[in-house]
């Protein structure tokens, strides 16, 4: 049976679309940060992202009552892969240029590898991977520019929060692998649980007083509700699972190369951010580091993994 051209290229279209969606998240966070606190940004993002994910999970029959016995693990995942992760990125983006923040998001696999080395004895500690981590973190250090004279342009605090978010979501992959992989939970179900638990936690910590000026700013409001929530969180997870199911988990993880580039392009050409040449060089170093990590041990796995999306931002 010959596939139609549209169906044949659908995974590729989905792959590129996901990279663009995730790459645009940083400018949406930047606009929202003019009116909202990072915690508020994260709460509304998770709320509007949870709805399509939950509906999709129910429609596909992925949610099971038996999963309730793993509630404590879902709660931990909600902290690592949702609340702390999104908060770190929202806070970091509010302090940095959106393009720079997007570039730093490319370091997520580096932090995932560090966490794996620390908590998974079976993790391959090859020279190539270690070299990749050093190169990648050299890129992060260049962006941080700790010895520069103008810390307002490249804010160390912002870099630290981005690193916190990357470390948190990177650790979530290790946690899911150690405590949830054996249970063979559908990824969309795990995403539903972690977003749901995260929503409850954030509801206890969030100030719901939103300035009227925020809703009056259509760019900021639409960016948060549609860009970050429905597209950047809800639809992005669904698209990711589709890519995993059609192209495989390893191929799907390559989408992490796209968001930093998209974020940089948006920052420079659409917003006019004064991004320095060193940031482009640093981004290239991060890419090389991630490539050395992912290219060292191919895994012909075509099944979905029970962890949150790799590189989701």
Image (tube, rainbow, N blue to C red):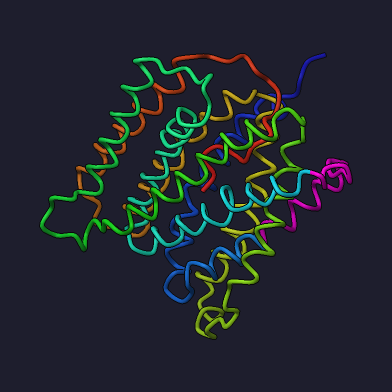
Q: Quadrant of the N terminus?
A: top right
Q: Position of residue 13 (x, y in %)?
A: 61, 34
Q: How many marks?
A: 0
Between 263 and 2, the residue placed more toward the observer is 263
* Magenta residue span: 48-69
Residue 296 to residue 8: above or below: above
Is 70 left or right of 166, judged from the image as shown? right
Quick check: can you spot residue 104? yes
Is 215 left or right of 92, judged from the image as shown? right
Is 143 left or right of 192, judged from the image as shown? left
Quick check: can you spot residue 232? no
Question: Going 66% across and 29% down the picture, which residue do you hit?
Answer: 244
Please tell me whether residue 54 belongs to the stretch shown in magenta.
yes
Q: Position of residue 278 (x, y in %)?
A: 20, 42
Residue furthest toward the bottom?
212
Is 281 left or right of 302, judged from the image as shown? left
Question: Going 44% across and 69% down the picture, which residue do you hit?
Answer: 33
Q: Quadrant of residue 197?
A: bottom right
Q: Position of residue 128 (x, y in %)?
A: 35, 16
Between 231 and 139, the residue placed more toward the observer is 139
Q: Main secondary structure of the magenta part?
A: helix
Question: Going 65% across and 27% down the picture, which residue do you hit?
Answer: 9
Q: Position of residue 95 (x, y in %)?
A: 34, 63
Please tell me whether residue 18 belongs to the stretch shown in magenta.
no
Between 195 and 312, the residue placed more toward the observer is 195
């Amino acid at each position: 049976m010959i596939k139609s051209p549209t169906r044949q290229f659908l995974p590729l279209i989905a792959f590129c679309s996901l990279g663009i969606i995730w790459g645009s998240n940083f400018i949406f966070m930047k606009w929202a940060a003019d009116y909202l606190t990072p915690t508020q940004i994260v709460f509304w993002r998770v709320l509007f992202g949870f709805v399509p994910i939950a509906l999709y999970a129910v429609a596909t029959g992925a949610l099971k009552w038996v999963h309730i016995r793993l509630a404590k693990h879902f709660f931990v995942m909600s902290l690592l892969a949702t609340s702390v992760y999104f908060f770190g990125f929202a806070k970091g983006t509010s302090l940095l240029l959106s393009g720079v923040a997007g570039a730093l998001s490319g370091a997520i696999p580096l932090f995932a590898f560090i966490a794996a080395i620390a908590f998974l004895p079976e993790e391959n500690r090859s020279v190539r991977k270690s070299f990749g981590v050093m190169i990648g973190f050299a890129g992060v250090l260049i962006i941080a520019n700790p010895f520069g004279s103008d810390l307002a342009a490249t804010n160390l605090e912002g870099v630290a929060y981005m690193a916190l978010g990357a470390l948190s979501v990177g650790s979530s992959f290790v946690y899911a692998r150690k405590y949830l992989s054996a249970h063979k939970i559908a990824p969309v179900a795990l995403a539903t649980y972690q977003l749901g638990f995260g929503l409850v936690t954030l509801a206890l910590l969030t100030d719901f007083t939103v300035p009227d000026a925020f809703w009056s700013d259509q760019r900021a409001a639409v960016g948060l509700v549609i860009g970050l929530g429905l597209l950047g969180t809800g639809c992005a997870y669904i698209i990711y699972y589709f890519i995993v199911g059609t192209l495989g988990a390893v191929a799907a993880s390559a989408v992490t190369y796209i968001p930093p580039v998209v974020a940089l392009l948006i920052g420079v050409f659409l917003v006019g951010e004064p991004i320095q040449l060193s940031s482009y060089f640093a981004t290239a170093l991060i890419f090389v580091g991630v490539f050395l990590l992912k290219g060292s041990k191919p895994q012909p796995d075509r099944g979905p993994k029970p962890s949150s999306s790799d590189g989701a931002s």
